[in-house]
Image: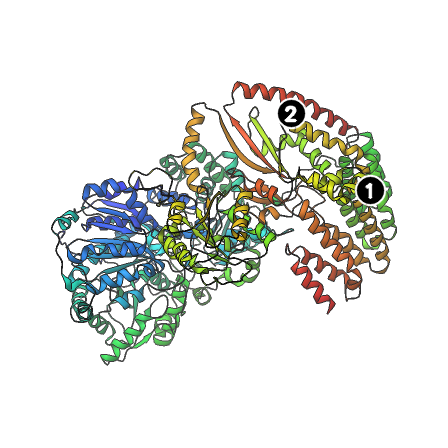
Amino acid sequence: MPAEHPTTVTSGEVGRGQPQPEGPRPLTLAIAALGGQGGGVLAGWVVSVAERGGYLAQYTSVPGVAQRTGATIYYLEMFPEDEARQAGTEPVLALMPTSGDVDIVIASELMEAGRSMLRGIVTKERTTLISSTHRVYAISEKSAMGDGLAPGEAILARARRDARQLIAFDMQALAEDKGCVISAVLFGALAGSGALGLPREAFEDTIRASGKAVDANLAGFAAGYDAARAGRADTTTPEQVTQPQAADPWQARSAEGERLFARVRAELPEAVHETAREGVRRTVDYQDPAYADLYLDRLKPVLAVDDAERDWGLTRETARYLALWMTYEDTIRVADLKTRASRFERFRREVRAKPDQIVHVTEFMHPRVEEICDTLPAPVGRMILGSRALRGFLGLFTRKGRHVSTNKLGGFVLLHTLAGFRRIRRLSLRYKVEHEKMQAWLERIAETAGRDYALAVEIACCQRLIKGYGDTHARGTQNYETLMANLELVASQDDPAARLRELRDAALADEHGEQLQSALAALRH
Amino acid sequence: MAERSFAKEVELLRKGADEEIRCEGILAVTKALLQSGVAYVGGYQGAPISHLMDVFADAEPLLNSLGVHFEASASEAAAAAMLAASVNYPLRGAVAWKSTVGTNVASDALANVASGGVTGGALVIVGEDYGEGSSIMQERTHAFAMKSQMWLLDPRPTLPCIVDMVEQGFRLSEASNTPVMLELRVRACHVYGRFTARDNVRPKYRLQDAMEKPNRDTSRIVLPPANFLHEHEKIDKRWPAAVEFIEREQLNEFLGADDGDVGIIVQGGLYNTLIRGLQGLGLADSFGRCRLPIYVLNVTYPLIDSEVHRFCAGKRAVLIVEEGQPEYIEFSLNTILRRADLQTAISGKDVFPKAGEYTGDVMRRSARAFLERWAPELLDADRARDTGAGQGAKPVVVPASTGNGDARANGAGNGVDAGPELSEVVPQRPAGFCTGCPERPVFTAMKLLEREIGKFHVSCDIGCHLFSILPPFNIGNTTMGYGLGASGSSAFNTEGANQRTISVMGDGGFWHNGLTSGIGNAVFNQSDNVVVIVDNGYSAATGGQDILSSRAANDVRSTRHDIGDAVRGVGVKWVKRVTTYDLKAMKGALKDAMTTDRKGPKVVIAESECMLNKQRRLKPLVQTALKEGKRVVRERFGIDEDTCTGDHSCIRLSGCPSLSVKPNPDPLRDDPVASIDNSCVGCGLCGEVAHAAVLCPSFYRASIVYNPSGWDRFQQRIRDGVIGYLQRRADARRARHAC
C-alpha cells in the first residue's frame, strides 16, 4: 500500500468566515458555438490569456453528442489572483452560466447568439455580446421545400436591445479572407472589446504560444480586433447585403436589348418595369429576342384586366412567374448553362482554385427516356413515349446516371452540341407541353381577375410549385395540377385567395403531399 | 487512434510532489490514480469519461514503467469483472465508464464484487451523464450504490478535492472491504483547473505476485452459504467501518457559517453552483463564505448519522440540495432525524424542481423559496444581488450594488421577458452526421428503398448511426441500448409477415455484445429479419477509439478481426459486405436482404472508414506529399446556382453539414439555392444521390490537381484552346442580343 499522508480535502479556508457579498467576483465568459467549430480552441486561448493577465482561470464544457454538429456551450470564470492571495483562499468558481451573471458572451454564429439570449445569459446591465453575423443553417432551415431560413435581423435587433455592448460582424468572412480559424477573429474581437481589461500583446502572445498557423491567426486576430475597436455592430446579416447591381440595370448591352427594354417601358406600367426587365433578360438569355417579345406579348391580356389602383400587382406577379415558366429547365438549358465560360470561372472561384491550377469538373446527369423525348421534335418524342418497344430500347441506355467531364473535349462537345438544340427548341415536345399549360394558366388568371383579383394573384403565384427536375418536377407539377383542379372548391370558400395560399403552403410542407391532401380534405368538409 | 490525442498532456502525469498541474478533471483523476499506487485500470469509453480512456491509452509507456496494467475493456461488464483482481489480493484497481448506461451493463459483476467484498482498493469512476450535454436516459447512479451497498463519492468540483477523493476512495475501499464509486458530472470531468501533485507510486503488490502465488478464500465467492453471510457482513462490518473512516478522515465538510438556525446540506458536486446561487441572494461571496452553515456531502452514500445529527441539531430547518430523482438522500435524512427524534424540518424537493439539472438559476430560485419560508430575515437584508453591476470598465472588482433584485434574482432579466418570439426564430440544432460521414448513405439508401418496397420497421442501436432518428432522415423506431439493435426487433419474428424489419448496429455495439445478443440470438431463434452492421473501423461516437475490427495499425492492441468472419462463425448464412458510399450497391444489398427467399437472419455489413478519423489520418500524408511536390488530386463537390431550383430534395436525402443553402442570386426567385462550402471532403454522396434519386444536374465534382505533371499541363492546354474557342463563339452570339 502507498504511504498514507494527511488528507487535504478541505483545501485552505474555502467557505469559512463571514461573507462579503460586495467583494470581488469572477469575470464570467460563455462561448456559444457549434460542435466542430473550434470553440474548445478559443476557450483554451482565453484561459491562457487570462492566466497571463494574472487571473485564476477555470473552464469547462459539455461535449458529448453536441460535438457532432449540435449547439454547445463553453464556460469560463476568471478570478484575479491578487484578490485570492489577499483573501488567503481559493475562490469557488461555477461550472455553468447563470442568468444575470455573465460578463461576456461570444457566439460563433448568429443563431447561437440568439440561443444565448434565450438562455437569459445576455443582460443589459452586464453582458458584452460578441457575435459573428454569419449563418450556419440548421437542418430545419436547409431541408424546407421552399424558403425556411430564420430571419437573422431579428436576432441582431434583439441583441442591440438586450446586450450592454454589442460587437457583431461577419467574422467567418474575415476568417476566410485571412485563411485562419474563426476563433482567431473572435479572439481579436474579444481583445478589441476591452472586456477582459488585458493588453493586446497578451492576446497575441497567446496565439504565438499555441504554435499553430500563427501568422494567419494573428492576421485574423488583428482584423477582429480592429473591427471591435471601431465598435462595429452590423445591423444586417451578410446575406441581406444585396448583390452590387450593374451601374444602370437599364443599360442594355446590345441594340436588341435596348429595343426590348424600350418595349418594357413603353408598354408596361412602372410598377412592373423591374420584374419585366429581368423577365426579358432571362427569356433572351434562354432563347432569343423573339422569345422575349413573346413574353411581353403574353403579359398584355393580364395587363388589360389589371389596374393602377392595385398597383399592378397581378401583372407584376404574372411577369415574374411567366418568365420563370417560359425558361423551364430542360436538357438544352442545363447543357447551355454548364458549358458557359462564366460558369467555368464560377466553379474555379467556388473551389478556390489558383489562377493557373488545373481543375477537372464532372457533372452528375441522369437523363431518362422522358428527358430525351422532351428534347426531340414533338411528333417523334410522342411516338417514342407511346411505343413500349422504343421506350424499352432507349431505356437500356438510361438506366445508369452519366458522369460527364465538361472540361474535357468529349464531354464539352457533347454538352455544347446539346446546347445547340436551342435552335429547334420550339419544335420540341417539352415546348409544346409547357406552353399549352402556360397558356391555360394565363387564361385562367385573366378570367379570374374580373371576379376575384386577389385569387388571380394567388393563381399566378402557384407557378412557384413547378420547379426542379425529374421526380421533383413531376411532383411539383402534380401539386400544381391538383390546386388548379380544385379552384372551384377554393372559390366556393370564404376568402378564396387565402385558402389557395394555404393549399400552396401545404403543398410545400412535405414531400409526400400528405399535408396538401389533409388541407384539401378540410376544405371539402 | 482516438479523436483527441493527449500525447502532450500525459507528460503532466510524470510530475512529482509539490509541482503544480493545470489540466482538465479527467486528467487529474488519472494522475490521482497513479499517485494512489493503482495496479490495474480498465473501462469502457463514452462521454464524459472517454478522455480518461484516451489519456490512459496515450500514457501506455508511463503506465508500463510504473507497472500498471491498462486494459480497454470489451464492455463495462468486462471492466467491472476486472475488479475481481482486488478480491483476494491487496491490488488497487480502478475502472471507469459512462453512467448510468455503463453501470447498467456492469451491474452483474458489480453486484458480485460488492457482495464478496474486496481486499485491495477498488474504485469505480463513473461519468454521470446527466443534464445539459447528456445523450442518455436521465437516471441516478445513486440507486446502484444503494442496491449493492457500494460507497458513493461526489466530490466538490474542484481539482484538489477530486484528486483527494480518488486517493481517499482507495483507502475507504480497503478500510471497509467495499468497492467505492466516484461520481463526476459532465462539467466536472471537463473542468480545467489546477492542483498540487504528489509523487506517482508503483504498486507495492504486483499483478505477477498474485499470478505466481495465488491464494483463495471461498468465503469471498457468491454462492451459498457465503452469499447469505455477505449480506450480514455488509451491514455488521463493512458499513460501520466505512462510517468510521469517513468521519475520522472528515471526507464530508462543514463549510459556511459556524452556526445558524437554518442550514443547507448539498451533494459535493453541486457545491459550486449552490454558492453561485447564494451569491445571487447576497448570502455568499466568491470565496464560498456564507451566512448559512453548509454541510457538504463529498460522500453521498452512506450518510453519516452522527454528522447529520450534529448539523441538524438546533436548526429549525435544513435544505437538502439533491439533483435528480428519486430524492434518496432526502428520504434518508428524514429517517435519520426521525430515529433520533430531532424536529428539524427537511426541505428539498418541495422547493426544488423534482426533475432536471440544478443550474445557478434553479439554485437561486429554490434557495430563495426555502428562505422565504424559514428565514425571511436573511433575505430582508435587501442584498439580493442586482445584476445591474458592472457598469465600470473592469466588472471584476465592481461591487454588487443594491437595487431591484427581485426580478433579477428570479432569473427574469431582460433576456427572458421577450423570450417567446425569439424562441420562434432560433432553430433547434440537433446533432447530426459529420461532413462526409460514411453512415449517411446507409440511411439515404433506406429512404430510397422505402419508396420502392414500402415502409418498414427500423430498430436502432447506440452510436453515431442513431442520428438517423433526427432530421433529415427521421428513420428509426426504438433504441434499447448499446449493441441491442438486433435484439430490439427480435419479437418481430412471426410467420406470414409481408415485410421484414431492419435493425442497425454499429461495430462498437457489435463487439460490446451485439454479436451474441443480436446476431447469435437471431440465428438461434431463426429470425428472418435484416441486420445492418455499420463498420466504420472505430468506436466513432465515443471519440474514435480502436476496436477489434479496426483496420488501422495498432502496436498495443490486436485489431483487424473481421466482422464478417464473426457473423458467419455464429451461423449466419446470408452475409453481404458493401461500401456505403456506393449508394446503388448499398440500396441493392438492402433490397436483396429484404426480399430474398433465403430464410434466417440477413446481415449487411456496411463498410467505410469514419470520415473524422480518415481525415485525421490522411491530412498529414497529403500535406507531406504536397510539400514533396508529388501530384495530388483533391476532390470536392459544388452546385451550380443557376440550375438549382431550390427544392432541397438533396438536403433531405443527405443532411451533410457542408451541403447548405444560400440566398438565391436570381432576382426572380425567392427560395434559397443549395450550396456546398469549402469544408466538403469530397465523399461523393451528393453526386450519388443526384444519380440514384434522379434529382437534378446541379451537382458537380471538382478535381483540383496540385503539382500537375507535364502531361496534365499539355492536355490542359489543348482543352483550354478548343473549349475556349467554342465558349468565345457562344459568348459572342449571346452578346449580339444581350440585355
Circle 1 packing at 10 Å, graded few (<14), some (14-19), many (20+), is many
**Residue B86 sits in which quadrant?**
bottom left
Marks 1 and 2, Cα distance to the nearest angstrom? 36 Å
Percent of width and height locating residue B53: 31, 48
Q: Is residue A76 or residue B739 the one in the foreground?
A: B739
Q: Which residue is mark 1?
A: A295
Same chain for labels 1 and 2? Say yes or no.
yes
Q: Is residue B111 above or below residue B203?
A: below
Q: Is residue A339 above or below residue B226?
A: above
Q: Is residue B225 above or below residue A30?
A: below
Asked whether, in this view, residue A258 is left or right of residue B378, the answer is right
Tag count: 2
Say what secondary structure mark 1 lies in.
Answer: helix
Q: Which mark is residue A118?
A: none
Circle 2 packing at 10 Å, graded few (<14), some (14-19), many (20+), is some
Type of residue at label 2?
Leu
Type of residue at label 1?
Tyr
**Residue A481 sits in which quadrant?**
bottom right
Q: Which residue is mark 2?
A: A409
Q: Chain of mark 1?
A: A
Percent of width and height locating residue B253: 23, 63
Asked whether, in this view, residue A383 is left or right of residue A503, the answer is right
